[in-house]
Image (cartoon, rainbow, N blue to C red):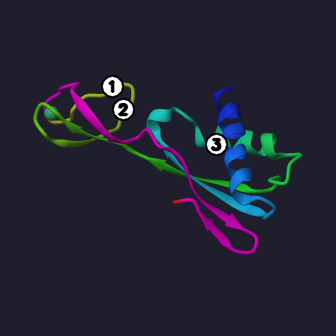
């Protein structure tokens, strides 16, 4: 499953960043183009971390909408249907994506203090 391998990757990054400290919440930015279902990702996170020091930690997922700039008419557009990437103004497929492909751990909440990964 796609989400399981993502959770394994997240776990590796979090373990490296947190060291011996206890992580309570992992903040994640997730672009809609990633086609990841947040509920499924959280479910897999519980499975992947069950027997690890990260057991009981929470994934806080911020869903990022898909936005783009149109190279044909220069309109900025937010795309609702991620299966059809077309400019809302002129219908051109010649888009420069601005957001929507994020898969980024932004911050860890720790039991004692915070660690900002930038
Ligand atoms: Zn356009």
Circle 1: element type: loop
Magenta stretch encompasses residue 107: yes
Query: Around disc 2, counting alpha carbons within 10 Å, would you say few (fewer than 14), some (14 to 19), or many (20 or more)?
Result: few
Question: How far apart, in angstroms, are the residues tagged by discs 3 and 1?
Answer: 24 Å
Q: Is residue 35 left or right of residue 60?
A: left
Where's the N terminus, which quadrant?
top right
Q: Earlier in the sequence, mark 3 or mark 1?
A: 3
Q: Is residue 27 left or right of residue 32?
A: right
Q: Residue at x 73, y 44 (%)?
A: 45
Q: Residue at x 36, y 32 (%)?
A: 81
Query: Around disc 3, counting alpha carbons within 10 Å, would you say few (fewer than 14), some (14 to 19), or many (20 or more)?
Result: few
In the rendered image, residue 108, in percent from the top left (x then y), is placed at 64, 61
Question: How far apart, in angstroms, are the residues tagged by discs 2 and 3?
Answer: 20 Å
Circle 2: element type: loop
Query: Around disc 1, counting alpha carbons within 10 Å, would you say few (fewer than 14), some (14 to 19), or many (20 or more)?
Result: few
Extent of the magenta region: 90-117
Which residue occupies the foreground of this view, 43 or 4? 4
Which residue occupies the foreground of this view, 83 or 53? 53
The quarter of the displayed image where residue 83 is located:
top left
Q: Residue furthest right?
A: 51
Circle 3: element type: helix
Which residue occupies the foreground of this view, 28 or 83? 28
């Amino acid at each position: 499953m796609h989400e399981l391998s993502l959770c394994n990757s997240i776990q590796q990054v979090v373990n490296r960043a947190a060291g011996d400290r206890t992580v309570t919440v992992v903040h994640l930015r997730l672009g809609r183009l990633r086609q990841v279902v947040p509920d499924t990702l959280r479910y897999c996170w519980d499975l992947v971390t069950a027997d690890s020091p990260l057991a009981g930690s929470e994934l806080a997922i911020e869903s990022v909408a898909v936005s783009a700039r149109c190279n044909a008419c220069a309109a900025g557009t937010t795309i609702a249907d991620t299966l059809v990437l077309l400019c809302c103004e002129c219908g051109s497929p010649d888009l420069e994506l601005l957001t929507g492909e994020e898969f980024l751990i932004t911050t860890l909440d720790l039991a004692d203090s915070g660690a900002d990964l930038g």
